[in-house]
Image (spheres, rainbow, N blue to C red):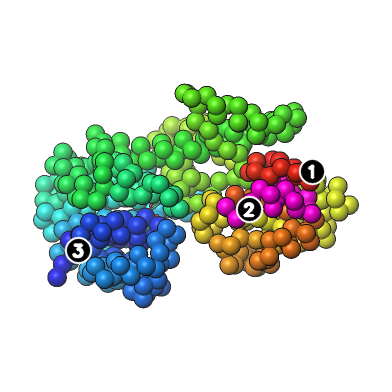
């Protein structure tokens, strides 16, 4: 029997979306080009933080199945595309997965089908990239024969409060009727929908949200650099500023940004703007500051090692938390890799502690991992708190026998140096 919904791409976005749809009673199937992903899910194993094996088991019991056979798209009422939108080697938008997904749908498109793109991309992707592929491959017309929509995903992996259901969702359609069909679909498992004027507005809104974070993190990072130069306590500055109840949203400095979204999405905006003869100056400035942060951490650590161990060469550094955000297992684009590489290049012996990351490679070689935190804090010449996982208790950090470089403003103690 044909699925009501086929989710294309069963990763950090597609799997939670599938779970939400299955919970709402939609007959859902998942399509993914990765055999290990399909086999894992079929075997009841989740590869996505925030979705447990028990969730996958419940989904399978409710009739969900994952496959790498595009025939599953045949007869589906709705197809939602949640495939990756990364960057090419040259740092430009890579829409190849979106194009592949749209081509696969086009071959099975039928009148009345709703096709939604959820992947993050620049304004015009739905209309100028996805629509032509769907129309050419099917001979059908978007907005006339089938419905085409864009609805960006806001999922925040590891967030215990906001999930697919209770996070307001932007929805847009090629035509008013397309938007209406998309609203009818999402209202089955999302509490609040916000209808954008068109797909370009919805695409731009998503890029604005993530670029807002990018630029503001760069701002506090640069303020932190200035404060360090001039002997001002950045963490006290932030504490004071955050007390303003209006007109100020707090952001924290750190070793740089990571993940699949924040460092990547602004590149989509900048590249699109460039191709249209528009220079996004705030983005260029933010990128410049953010790209310097891992090296700043390395420099600060080397200075500490020169003080404690005499010289950095042969000294030992312990990285605490190598994921790009706290209490998740995701190491995509993590700045920890650049920090580790910089320390290794300076002759420092680097190891790491991270309960979420069983293996962490830098320059193709695995970094030594330690499990016993207290032991490791006693042995290292310097520990660098890169990620604020809950397991790094303030007391444990403050009592460390080694010097501690804290990039998260968490620890207090005589051996602690704040970013
Ligand atoms: N991760 C997040 O927190 C997040 C949040 C909001 C939006 N997004 C956006 O959502 C999109 C998906 O991101 P993600 O984090 O889920 O990626 P992901 O890498 O976790 O998962 C993507 C999945 O798509 C599969 N895939 C690749 N090409 C495919 C194809 N042609 N057909 C079917 N499956 C294919 C991959 O095998 C993978 O399993 C991206 O555009 C991303 O920017 C991500």
* 338 relative to 209 in the view: left or right: right
Q: Nearer the viewer, residue 96 or 344?
A: 344
Secondary structure of residue under mark 3: loop
Q: Earlier in the sequence, mark 1 or mark 3?
A: 3
Residue 226 position by quadrant: top right
Instruction: Give the mark, 3 or 2, whose residue is nearer the N terminus.
Output: 3
Relative to the observer, which residue lies in front, 287 or 348?
348
Instruction: Compare marks 1 and 2 and give the one earlier in the sequence.
Output: 2
- The residue shown at (26%, 44%) is 191
Question: Residue drawn 69% across and 53% down?
Answer: 396
Secondary structure under the numbered disc 2 in the rendered image: loop
* Residue at mark 1: 414
- In the rendered image, residue 399 lying in the magenta stretch gets the answer yes
Disc 3 target residue: 27
Q: Which of marks 3 and 2 is in front?
A: 2
| Kind of element beneath mark 1 | loop
Can you tell me whether the CB of the residue at mark 1 lies under 8 Å from the nearest atom of ligand 1?
Answer: no
Residue at 22 percent across and 53 percent down: it is 115
Cα distance in 3D space between marks 3 and 2: 42 Å
Asked which quadrant contains residue 209, the reply is: top left
Label 2 CA crowd tier, 10 Å (few <14, some 14–19, many 20+)? some
Mark 1 neighbour class, 10 Å CA radius: few under 14, some 14 to 19, many 20 or more: few
- Span colored in magenta: 390-406
Residue 167 horizontal/vertical position (percent): 33, 44
- Ligand 1 appears in which quadrant? bottom left
Q: Which residue is disc 2 drawn over? A: 392
**Residue 377 coordinates in the image, percent (x, y):** 74, 58
Answer left or right for 341 relative to 270: right
Left or right, 398 with reference to 105? right
Q: Distance between the residues labelled 1 and 2?
A: 17 Å
Of labels 1 and 3, the one closer to you: 1
């Amino acid at each position: 029997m044909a699925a009501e919904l086929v989710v294309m791409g069963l990763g950090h976005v597609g799997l939670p979306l599938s779970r939400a749809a299955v919970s709402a009673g939609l007959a859902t199937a998942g399509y993914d080009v990765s055999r290990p992903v399909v086999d894992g899910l079929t075997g009841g194993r989740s590869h996505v933080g925030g979705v447990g094996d028990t969730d996958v088991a419940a989904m399978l019991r409710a009739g969900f199945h994952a496959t790498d056979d595009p025939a599953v798209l045949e007869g589906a009422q709705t197809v939602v595309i949640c495939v990756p939108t990364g960057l090419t080697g040259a740092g430009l938008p890579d829409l190849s997965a979106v194009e592949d997904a749209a081509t696969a749908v086009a071959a099975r498109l039928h009148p009345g089908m709703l096709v939604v793109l959820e992947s993050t991309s620049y304004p015009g992707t739905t209309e100028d990239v996805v629509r032509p592929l769907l129309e050419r491959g099917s001979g059908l017309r978007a907005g006339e024969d089938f419905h085409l929509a864009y609805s960006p995903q806001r999922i925040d992996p590891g967030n215990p409060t906001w999930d697919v259901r209770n996070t307001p969702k932007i929805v847009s359609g090629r035509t008013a009727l397309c938007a209406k069909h998309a609203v009818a679909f999402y209202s089955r498992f999302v509490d609040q929908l916000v209808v954008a004027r068109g797909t370009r507005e919805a695409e731009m809104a998503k890029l604005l949200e993530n670029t807002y974070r990018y630029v503001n993190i760069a701002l506090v990072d640069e303020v932190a650099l200035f404060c360090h130069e001039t002997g001002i306590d950045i963490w006290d500055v932030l504490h004071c500023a955050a007390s303003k109840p209006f007109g100020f949203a707090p952001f924290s400095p750190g070793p740089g940004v990571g993940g699949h979204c924040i460092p990547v999405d602004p590149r989509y905006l900048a590249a699109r703007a460039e191709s249209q003869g528009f220079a996004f100056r705030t983005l260029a400035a933010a990128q410049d500051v953010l790209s310097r942060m891992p090296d700043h951490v390395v420099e600060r650590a080397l200075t500490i090692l020169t003080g404690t161990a005499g010289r950095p060469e042969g000294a030992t550094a312990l990285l605490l938390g190598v994921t790009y955000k706290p209490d998740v297992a995701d190491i995509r684009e993590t700045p920890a890799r650049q920090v580790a590489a910089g320390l290794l290049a300076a002759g420092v012996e680097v190891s790491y502690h991270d309960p979420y990351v069983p293996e962490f490679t830098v320059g193709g070689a695995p970094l030594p991992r330690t499990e016993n935190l207290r032991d490791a804090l006693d042995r290292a010449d310097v520990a660098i708190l890169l990620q604020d996982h809950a397991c790094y208790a303030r007391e444990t950090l403050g009592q460390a026998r080694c010097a501690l470089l804290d990039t998260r403003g968490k620890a207090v103690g005589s051996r602690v140096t704040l970013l």
